[in-house]
Amino acid sequence: GASLLGLHFVTQTTQQDGHWHKQHKLALKTSHDLWLQQQQRLELGFSLQRDLRQNSTAAMLSLKLHLGNGRGLRDFAPEEIIFRELRQRRAPESAANLAGSHQNSQ
């Protein structure tokens, strides 16, 4: 499997009740891929987000099953998958068509 970790600082400006509000958030995200038979992928993710202005924290745990049916990552557009190249390199050798481009998956 492949484990990935990312730390992000985000500044957002949102409008609420006719007023503009600036948000400063610090986010820690991690995920782990477990490749199954027929290039199916089980993805376990965790994120922790801290809003520095609101003094609040949110956490999210996710479990996703990607039913690739032998297509690996080809069903996803290039910008949809974070660290796509790293995930492809860490996939099992038997996933020969994993690196195929999104355009060739038709």
Image (cartoon, rainbow, N blue to C red):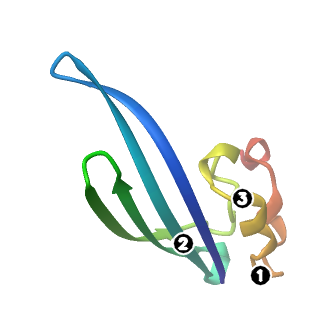
Q: Residues within 10 Å of mark 3 (few under 14, many from 20)?
A: some
User: For the point 38% across and 59% down, which residue is it?
Assistant: 49
Q: Amino acid at mark 3?
A: Arg
Residue 46 picture location, percent across and down: 43, 71
Left of 96 or right of it: where is 74? left
Residue 41 picture location, percent across and down: 58, 74
Query: In the rendering, which numbered label is found on residue 84?
Result: 3
| Residue 15 vertical position relative to residue 67 in the rendered view, above or below | above
Query: In the rendering, which numbered label is found on residue 31?
Result: 2
Q: Residues within 10 Å of mark 1 (few under 14, many from 20)?
A: some
Q: Earlier in the sequence, mark 1 or mark 2?
A: 2
The C terminus, quarter of image: top right
Which one is in front, 44 or 37?
44
Residue that protrudes farthest toward the left in the picture: 17
User: For the point 60% across and 48% down, which residue is it?
Assistant: 80
Contact check, label 2 and label 3, Cβ < 8 Å: no
Figure disc tally: 3
Q: CA distance from mark 1 to mark 2?
A: 17 Å
Residue 87 picture location, percent across and down: 72, 68
User: Helix, strand or loop at disc 2?
Assistant: strand
User: For the point 63% across and 83% down, which residue is it?
Assistant: 37
Q: Closer to the camera: disc 1 or disc 2?
A: 2
Query: In the rendering, which numbered label is found on residue 92?
Result: 1
Q: Earlier in the sequence, mark 2 or mark 3?
A: 2
The N terminus, quarter of image: bottom right
Q: Amino acid at mark 1?
A: Pro
User: For the point 70% across and 59% down, which residue is it?
Assistant: 83
Residue 3 picture location, percent across and down: 63, 78
Q: Amino acid at mark 2?
A: Ser
User: Helix, strand or loop at disc 1?
Assistant: loop
Q: CA distance from mark 2 to mark 3?
A: 13 Å
